[in-house]
Image (cartoon, grey):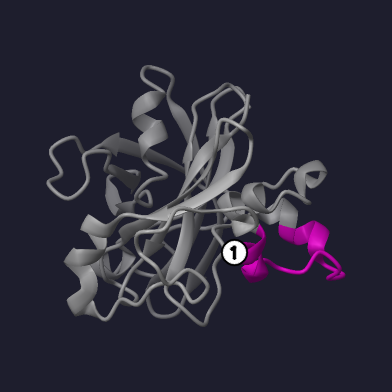
Amino acid sequence: MTEFEKIFLVWRKGAGTRRHAIGVLEKTSEGKNEFYYLPRAIDLIKEEGFTPYTEFQDLKTRYNGNVAEIFGQRLTKSDRPDISNFYKFWEVDPEKANDKFYLLGKTQGLVPTDNFEFLAEYIYQPSLHFLTELAGLSKYNTPRGTIKSGDVLRYELDKGNIYDKYAVMVYKNDTLLGYIKKYHSKVFYDAGDQKLHLQVKAVEENGILKRAFIKVSAQNH
């Protein structure tokens, strides 16, 4: 079973601002890749300074063909000497490393030069495992040292959240740290009674907790 069939292209104005899904990259029934914008969502953020992705300027076109390869230009080059460590960090299956669609979903396609990211809509299965980054850290100003690599965290479904019906709160004991990234969170609801496992993989800190990368997995993985 595939880990995901749909990836949301997400944009935000900058760190600490709300993420917006502005497009979808997905597998078609023929196994090809297709990309299209969500015009209604884009209308809501034009005043925030949003501009379309450079190679996909027309908001009404459904792009197909080599769209994953174009987006794949964001990906870390496979000939880097540390590429195996990169794949291990992002929970990438090396046997799928030539699949740009898969790599975009697993690594989020993050680059320091823009505010786009690619968030896969994961499908619950017993072998589920992926890396996500906690959202909302700037709101809580969590002191450095609160969490460390290897810590096991807990979560609660925030079903009353008016901004995200699939919101998931993440805690260290009774301390609210932040939220699972939007669109990564849906699988927590799909899992039903099958609780997922959260473990800290890496943190970045200055005076406060700045970034936290969390491995999400099925309990028996």
Q: The residue under label 1 is which amino acid type?
A: Phe
State the residue position of label 1: 71
> In the displayed structure, does residue 56 sit left or right of residue 101?
left
74, above or below 7, in the image: below
Q: Whole-percent x and y of residue 31?
A: 64, 35
Q: Quadrant of the C terminus?
A: top right
Q: Whole-percent x and y of residue 206?
A: 44, 80
Residue lying at 80% horizontally and 63% vertically, measured from the top left: 83
Q: Residue furthest top?
A: 193
Q: Secondary structure at mark 1?
A: helix
Q: Whole-percent x and y of residue 192?
A: 36, 20
149, above or below 174, in the image: below
Q: Report the front residue among 198 and 168.
A: 168
Residue lying at 22% horizontally and 46% vertically, measured from the top left: 164
> In the displayed structure, does residue 60 sit left or right of residue 96?
left
- Specify the segment rendered in magenta: 69-86
Q: Residues within 10 Å of mark 1 (few under 14, many from 20)?
A: some
Q: Whole-percent x and y of residue 168?
A: 30, 42
177, above or below 166, in the image: below
Q: Quadrant of the N terminus?
A: top right
Q: Report the front residue among 217 and 19.
A: 19
In the image, residue 80 lies in the stretch drawn in magenta: yes
Residue lying at 71% horizontally and 68% vertically, measured from the top left: 76
Residue lying at 44% horizontally and 68% vertically, measured from the top left: 116
Quarter residue 75 falls in: bottom right
